[in-house]
Amino acid sequence: MKKIQIDNLYFEEFIGYEQIQKAVRLMGLDISVQYAGKNPVFIGVLNGCFMFMADLMKCIEIPCELSFVKLTSYDGTAQGDMIHELLGVGIDLANRHVIIIEDVIDSGNSLKHTLEALEKHNVASVGVCALLMKPDCLQYEFDNIIQVGFEIEKEFVVGYGLDYNRQYRNLPDIYKNVPISR
């Protein structure tokens, strides 16, 4: 099993690249069937979604558009309650089918913020596709999550777009924080 150390934290491989790719292919095919004839707009939530969204879009087999929003709520390993929108969508979304692409849904704060912002654009529908979801951390109920690659516990994870202090997004696998073995 691959292990890495980041500062004084230790991580071990949690979800390997091949396993991620298999889940992404299945999600892409399913979305292509669900949204056939709808020309959806995929909105990626940066920075964490960039690897996932790039791989997912390669598996989408229908006409579509894409854009991004940038939100932040983390400081190191601690999630903050305040959401800061840094970059907007830039596409007219009225009467469009929108699919939000998230790297991870844990508390649901950033997703709630994004959904509320989209309501103002009179969209036809909103679906959410997330690589990871932490059900035990959710503070809200969402009825529009259409795809989740992996449900995980409350672990802190890095890699495949997920960061620790803005670093390690480039790792192809996902690693989880583990206690120090003595």
Image (cartoon, rainbow, N blue to C red):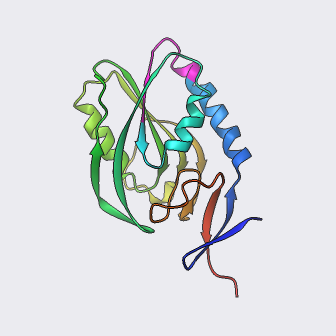
**Rendered location of residue 3, percent (x, y):** 70, 69
Query: Is residue 41 one of those drawn in magenta?
Result: yes
Residue positioned 58% across, 53% down in the render: 170
Of residues 148 and 58, the one nearer the viewer is 58
Of residues 34 and 100, the one nearer the viewer is 100
Q: Looking at the image, which residue sits at the far right?
A: 1
**Rendered location of residue 164, percent (x, y):** 49, 64
Query: On screen, 130 above or below 83?
Result: above
Residue positioned 54% across, 55% down in the render: 169
**Rendered location of residue 105, percent (x, y):** 46, 50
Q: Which residues are magenta?
A: 32-43
Query: On screen, 179 above or below 90?
Result: below
Residue positioned 66% across, 69% down in the render: 4
Q: Is residue 143 visible?
A: no
Residue positioned 64% across, 81% down in the render: 180
Q: Is residue 92 visible?
A: yes
Query: Is residue 66 one of those drawn in magenta?
Result: no
Query: On screen, 147 above or below 70?
Result: above
For the C terminus, give its image quadrant: bottom right
For the N terminus, give its image quadrant: bottom right
Based on the displayed image, in which of its 4 quarters is residue 69 positioned?
top left
Q: Looking at the image, which residue sits at the far left?
A: 120
Q: Looking at the image, which residue sits at the far bottom?
A: 182
